Structure formats: structure tokens, C-alpha cells
Amino acid sequence: MALTAIDNFINNEFVKPTEGAYFDTFNPAHGVPHAQIPDSTKADVDLAYKAASTAFTTWSKTTKAERARILYKIADLIDARQDEFVRAESKDQGKPISLAKTVDIPRAAYNFRFFAGRILHSVEEAAELEGVGFNYSQRMPIGVAGLISPWNLPLYLLTWKIAPCIACGNTAICKPSEFTSLTAYMLCSVLKDAGLPAGVVNMVFGTGMKAGQALVEHPRIPLISFTGGTVTGAKIIANSAPHFKKLSLELGGKNANIIFADCDFEKALTTSLRSSFANQGEICLCGSRIFVERPIYEKFLNGLVDGAKKLKVGDPSAHDTNLGALVSKEHWEKVKSYIDLGVKEGGKIECGGDKPASLQDEFQNGYFLEPTIISGLTPSCRVMREEIFGPVVTIYAFDTEEEVIQITNDSEYGLSCSLWTENGRRARRVAGEIQAGTVWVNTWMARDLRMPFGGMKKSGLGREGGEHSLDFYTELKTICLAD
Ligand code: NDP
């Protein structure tokens, strides 16, 4: 049976890629192709640019109130089609349906609601220059933005870019991940049904090497918002440099999860199971380096191993599944190679390490991996330094606060960190020393969209969230009026 092919979305119309080429996208739980994705090229990006630049002339002049009205409508329509989006996201990405239902899709709707409200309530600066006059600042939309997103939280992260981009009066060309394009495709109809004018959001599907790079190298696209791996981020910096593009880069991480002996043990343990293995460990914020203060190391390790063994791995569409499938065969192989490397580096596999033995027949070709805990490695090992991005964590005993701060910061990444202690002074002291864009104390993944979000070091450039997103998606100008 021929697979359903999706098409690009340009000027509010579904159009075939100019060269007519498509590639298969796979259902990770079954390991079989389930749809075809346009293999778009520079020519498709050029078409989308034409639509987006034409739309910019009117959309950039639309009132904030009108833009907000449409954004609220988009959010309502995502909610109305929530079940459909949830099923598609789980099927396409491999994630448990419960996660798509409680995190991915509600957050996609909320991204639109949040920025609809945010633009209505922003206030600019004003200052009197004594004896001369009066200054005020004004935000201008910038133009056509290139929005490039990864496969781990497909709709959640794409809408985190689209919503502020169009709320600020820009227009967009989106390039979702080649592995997870289906919910982005479904979003196109929602945008149209919500009354978003033609050309304001365009979707060009395909690979990073062709469609993504064409966006980055396009001389008239002045800003690129990218979420993905650090190596790709470096290419984007290099390829966009000749054009002086404004860049927002949300990149990889190797986040520490620090457990002090005075923590609320049960809370730290339960949350650490989540921060280790949620979404199969395919969340940039997962805490993959667990550092436990020595007096409670054995107890915590045993608790974590017991908990990991109880997690249910399998059918993403079953409501009690904890871990679904990894996104692709290539990614499964990459993650597995790090488990093997961990053994070579002298680590001990405390649990997991391979494909679960208990999979039903229909999932035998799926990309499933058991939650894996590795002990016995030192902080200099590659497995403790490089991003794995799967259900694999290392666990290590530390003795002092100074030591754990040093090993946490001895990383080329600086995205996030969790720390667990009931000592408030220590919490503030350690949080203040950690080199990471977000530090959670006694929690994980709690996110207030008004607050800055981003990474230090090789985890990213720039901040998004609240005012910071407005800063990225607008040019800020000062106007001085003489008396
Ligand atoms: P990639 O960097 O491989 O891809 C991200 C996107 O970039 C995809 O759409 C990809 O296309 C595209 N791309 C690839 N090469 C280029 C290029 N040369 N020019 C332009 N675009 C390109 O990341 P993954 O999709 O593998 O996502 C996982 C990574 O994302 C992890 O490192 C993770 O930590 C990070 N991440 C960071 C987050 C943060 O907030 N800091 C949040 C979520 C994930 P293609 O479709 O071909 O893959």
C-alpha cells in the first residue's frame, strides 16, 4: 500500500516539493515507514520566502490585538484537536501517549496563548533627557524568520518559535525535523482555520542538509531560531556568518543532577527517575550525570535501579507505558554505542543496557531500549562528558560541595542542573556557582515561560522566554523627540 505523502505549506496552500522528491519517515515503535516527507530544496525555500516576504508587508502592520486574537484562536483549535495531535505525536516520535497528552500538545497550545497575552502587555521604555527632549523605545518586527526544530519535542518546540515570531509581527519559514514532521503538517490546517493570513507561516519539510541549510544561507532571511545539537549549531553559526544574521541557538546538554545527603530522599528519587528517563531520555534537560553524596550513595543507587526496573517499556500508545521507542534506528545505534563504550571505559551496567526482552511481537523491530544506569565511571570518561540523549544515566559518589561544583562545571555544556538539598543556604550557594542556564532546586522541568531560558557555553547562544523572546524577534529602536 502506498504511504500517505505530506506536502509543503506555502501561502496557506499545500504544495508538492518542486523537484517532486519524497523520503520515508518511520514509525519508531514498529520500525516501518509510515509516511512520506517532501525532500525540499533551495527552490522550495525560495518559494516560501516569496510568500513570507509578501505577507510581511501587511502582517507587520497588523495590530497587536488582531495578532493576539488569531494566536488565541490557534491555541483553541489545537485544544479542540488535542486527541488527534496526541496520537500523531506519539506515533511519529515514539513517545508514550501519556507524555504527549500531558506535556507536548498542551504546551504547544499554551505557547500560542502565552505570547498572545505577552505582546498585549508589553511596555516600552521612555526617558526624559533634561533640556533636550524625550526618548522612547520602539520594537520593530524584523522580517522573515527561519525556524528550525528538532525531533524530541516536535510540536512543543516548533510552536515555541512560531508563537513569539508571529506575535511580534514577523513571518516565518519553518523546517521541522525530517524524523518528526507530522504534527507540524497538521498544524498547517489549524493555522489556516484560525484565520492566519496566507504566507505568515510557511512549512518547508525535508532535511537539514538541503532545506535547513538553504534557510540558514538565504541572504534575505535575517534571523534564525534553531534548536538542536551543538555540532549543527556550530555549522549554523559558520554558514550564517556572512549575512550577520540574528541567531538564537538552543543546543545540547550534559546536565548534572546533584543529590545531597540532606535531601528529601523519596522526592529526589522519584523525580530523578523522571529526569533520567522521561521521553526515553530524549529531552535536552534530562539529568544524565547523577552525583550522589557518599553517605546515601548506595541507598540512592539501589532505589534508582529498583525504580528503573519497574518502568514499563513498550507500546507508546498504551496508557501505562513509561518509555516508548527511541526516534530512529540510527539514534538507537548511537545510544547503544555509548552503553558499550561505558563498559569499555570500566563502567558497570547496574540495570538495562539493551533492547527489552519482553517486547510483544509487533514491536520486535522497534527502537526500544531499557532504562540504563551505569556506575563506576569517573568524570573524565567520555560517557560522562558527551551528550547521549537516550535512556542512559551515569551515577557517581561525591564527598564535598566544592568537589561536586567542580565536576558539574567541568563540562563544555551548561544547559541545566538539578540539585536536591533541604538546606536553603546551601541551595542558594551552590545554585549561584553552577554554570548552567537553568538550575532547579528540589524539582525538575518546572518552567515559567516569563523567565529566561537558554544555555551557557556550548549549550547555546541567547535567551528565549518572556521579554527575551521579544528581544530576539524584534529590533529595538530609540526615538529621541526634541523639545
Ligand atoms: P540536529 O542538530 O541533528 O537537528 C536539529 C534540526 O536542524 C533538524 O531540523 C535538522 O534537520 C536541522 N539541521 C541539521 N543540519 C542542518 C544544517 N546544516 N543547517 C540547518 N539545519 C540543519 O538535532 P536533533 O534533531 O538530533 O535533536 C537533538 C539535539 O537537540 C540534542 O543535542 C538536544 O540536546 C538538542 N535540544 C536542545 C534543546 C534546548 O532547548 N537547548 C531542546 C531540545 C533538543 P533534519 O531534519 O535533517 O534532522
Image (spheres, rainbow, N blue to C red):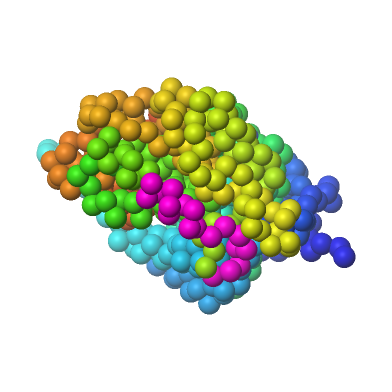
| Residue at image location 36% in from the left, 55% down from the top | 270
Quadrant in the picture for the N terminus: bottom right
- 92 lies left or right of 126: right
- 64 lies left or right of 319: left
- 216 lies left or right of 40: left
Front residue of 169/478: it is 169
Going by the picture, which residue comes out furthest to the top?
380
Position of residue 114 measured from the top left corner of the image (x, y, whole percent):
38, 62
Quadrant in the picture for the C terminus: top left
Position of residue 93 measured from the top left corner of the image (x, y, whole percent):
62, 56
**Number of callouts:** 0
- Where is 107 relative to 234, above or below? below
Region in magenta: 302-319
Front residue of 436/194: it is 436
| Residue at image location 62% in from the left, 52% down from the top | 356
- 16 lies left or right of 204: right
Q: Is 315 colored magenta in this rendering?
A: yes
Position of residue 123 measured from the top left corner of the image (x, y, whole percent):
27, 55
- Where is 11 relative to 41, above or below? below
